[in-house]
Image (tube, grey):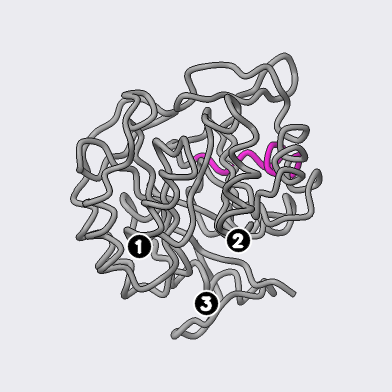
Amino acid sequence: MLKTRIIPTLLIKDVALVKGERFDNWRRVGAPMQAVKVYNTRDVDELIVLDIDATREGREPDYDLIGSLARECFVPLCVGGGVRSVDTVRCLLRSGADKVCINTAAYESPGLIRDVAESFGAQCVVAGIDARVSNGGYECYRDCGRTSCGCEPGEWARELEALGAGEILVTSVERDGTMAGYDLDLTEQVSSSVEIPVIASGGAGSYEDMLQAVKRARASAVAASSLYLFTQSTPLEAKAYLAARGVPVRHTTITPLENGR
């Protein structure tokens, strides 16, 4: 059985660590390098670093920044934002990334997913899906949640899997940064549509939210940002909480909690 991964997300804007709500109202909350160093000590399984301006500004990722973060990062590093070509992916991997997250570019050129998977392996490709509630269901959005794509997340996830994506990062735009809990229906819609791992993202406010994403929505991993930035919660305690409730997790150095948040 695959073990559930605990994955902090770092959002980068103008080389600063930022956080917002619903993909808006961004504010600086620190330095990405310091965050990476802290997470190195917290038994995280992976890190996701997303440049929220690269696609909107039509530029490539900041390879120097990614390289400096990768040199300090002791766990697998997934990088997204501005990924539009196989050459961009190659440069990110050379900079030290282990995986790339492709979102907007996949809608514009679905073949990019296939090309990257064929060039570097499916394990390198994390396909991002940002979704909003729409007409009683869900609709995919690109350009950092700004532009409707006119497709349903489960359907799009199946296409991404067929193209060669190794896993899916699904984020609820409405829940992002609110700490109101993951959108379990959205996550389950995607996870039930594919065989590849699905990372739940957007809204984690407690360890119980993570448990529900795994147990009810069948997520393979749980990503969070505000939970770690604005509360005393830690990835290490998240693992302990899940382990105490029967969820297989990767190695943890503390005794599973009997009572968690």
To which residue does mark 1 refer?
96
Precedes in sequence: disc 2 or disc 3: 2
In the rendered image, which quarter is residue 5 located in?
bottom right
Kindly state the secondary structure of the residue where label 1 is placed. Answer: loop
How far is disc 3 from disc 1 in space, using C-alphas? 35 Å
Mark 3 surroundings: few (<14), some (14-19) or many (≥20) residues within 10 A: some
To which residue does mark 2 refer?
123
In the rendered image, which quarter is residue 17 located in?
top left
- Magenta-drawn stretch, dominant element (helix, strand or loop): helix
Q: Quadrant of the N terminus?
A: bottom right
Q: Which residue is rendered at x = 43% and y = 72% of the image?
A: 236
Q: Nearer the viewer, residue 12 or 182?
A: 12
How far is disc 2 from disc 3 in space, using C-alphas? 32 Å
Q: Is residue 253 left or right of residue 245?
A: left
Kindly state the secondary structure of the residue where label 2 is placed. Answer: helix
**Residue 144: percent from the left, percent from the top?**
45, 27
* Numbered range of the magenta stretch: 180-189
**Residue 77: percent from the left, percent from the top?**
41, 61
User: What amino acid type is highlighted by mark number 3?
Assistant: Leu
Tell me the mark number nearer the camera, choosing from 2 and 3.
2
Precedes in sequence: disc 3 or disc 1: 1
Q: Which residue is rendered at x = 36% and y = 25% of the image?
A: 24
User: What amino acid type is highlighted by mark number 2?
Assistant: Gln
Report if residue 34 lies within the magenta region: no
Do callouts 3 and 1 mark residues in contact (Cβ within 8 Å)? Answer: no
Precedes in sequence: disc 2 or disc 1: 1
User: What amino acid type is highlighted by mark number 1?
Assistant: Gly
Kindly state the secondary structure of the residue where label 3 is placed. Answer: loop
Tell me the mark number nearer the camera, choosing from 3 and 1.
1
Q: Single out the residue that lies furthest toward the top.
A: 135
To which residue does mark 3 refer?
257
How far is disc 2 from disc 1 in space, using C-alphas? 15 Å
